[in-house]
Image (cartoon, rainbow, N blue to C red):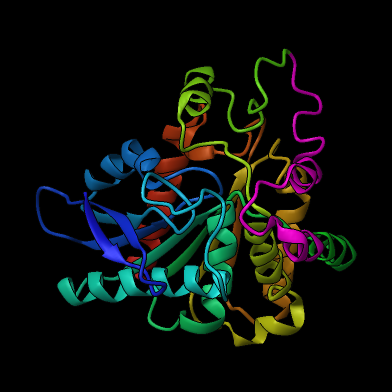
Amino acid sequence: MGKMTSVTGAQLETWEWRPQGEVRAVLQLVHGMAEHIARYDAAAKRLNEAGYLVVGHTQLGHGAKAETLGWFAAKDGWDALIEDVHSLREATQKANPDAPYFLLGHSMGSFVVRTYCLKHEQGLAGVILSGTGHFEPPILNAALCIANLQCMFGGEKKPSKMLADMSFAGYDKGIVPKRTAFDWLTRDTEIVDRYVADPFCGFPFTAGGYRDMFRGLKRLYPKNLAAMDKTVPVRLFSGGSDPVGQQGAGVKTTMREMLDAGVEDVSLKLYENARHETLNELNRETVLNDLLQWMEEQLKA
């Protein structure tokens, strides 16, 4: 465990998982909403076995170092997330100049990575998006309007129950039995229970955090995707029962929009019955093997 300074000046926790032998490639992880980078420990160690150096950081508004959980910054919060990812990438590449570099974002982290690609994608060996989704403009505009109003009336750093209820409404639909409010994350009940018990998981975002995230999501409209580096391959993977990706429909739309924008190599893998956190699912060994196989194909290419 280490630390880095955010572009905002805040201190962030970093993790590095180093393989025993030669570093064949680097994978940088960008975690999701209301969690932290330590949750990727098991997956990172599995990737170490294949010679991958894995790095990541706990993002602004998350973890023990957060000024306020669910709040990024007083100004340009989404850009701060993007630039923090880039800072860690630059530092890691400086220390490992010859290693091919992959970037993986999960859930909210996938949205950070997708907006990152509009600015800093050049030079990556591949982009990997886990548990991503697609949001239509009317829904985003309405949600952003509510977030802006709540911020205007003093709620910027206060948890927004209204936006949380809107954002996660129906996520547990069809899950039987319903044990917790977070069963939609994975069928692995032990991991769900650890998530529920973790004070740095599952917390509500503030109105300011939602505002910044909705602003970031609006950048992903098709008209903006021309800024992507068309030569960098993109891999999407999600659970077939993941509500964030609309049970695969939203993931397929995301893939189609990238292909329409001219990205040369975009592929998708949906895992039947798996929920949101496929890296923490009952079939996670298969998911990790598939991820490794895809990265190996990029290294050979």
Pinpoint residue 243: horizontal percent, then vertical percent. Answer: 73, 41
Q: Out of 179 and 7, give the one closest to the viewer.
A: 7
- Residue farthest to the left? 21
Residue 260 located left or right of residue 195: right
Residue 208 located left or right of residue 49: right
Residue 132 in view in this figure: yes
Residue at the spot x=36%, y=69% of the render? 6
Residue 125 in view in this figure: no
In this rendering, the answer to whether 213 lies above or below 182 is below
Pinpoint residue 163: horizontal percent, then vertical percent. Answer: 77, 48
In this rendering, the answer to whether 288 lies above or below 192 is below
Residue range of the region highlighted in magenta in the rendering: 147-176
Q: Is residue 155 located in the magenta-colored stretch of the structure? A: yes
Residue 181 located left or right of residue 6: right
Q: Dividing the picture into quarters, in which one does residue 223 lie? A: bottom right
Q: Out of 211 and 183, give the one closest to the viewer.
A: 211
In this rendering, the answer to whether 53 lies above or below 183 is below
Residue at the spot x=77%, y=58% of the render? 150
Residue 43 located left or right of residue 268: left
In this rendering, the answer to whether 154 lies above or below 137 is above
- Quarter of the image with the C terminus is bottom left
Pinpoint residue 88: horizontal percent, then vertical percent. Answer: 31, 68
Q: Out of 36 and 111, give the one closest to the viewer.
A: 36
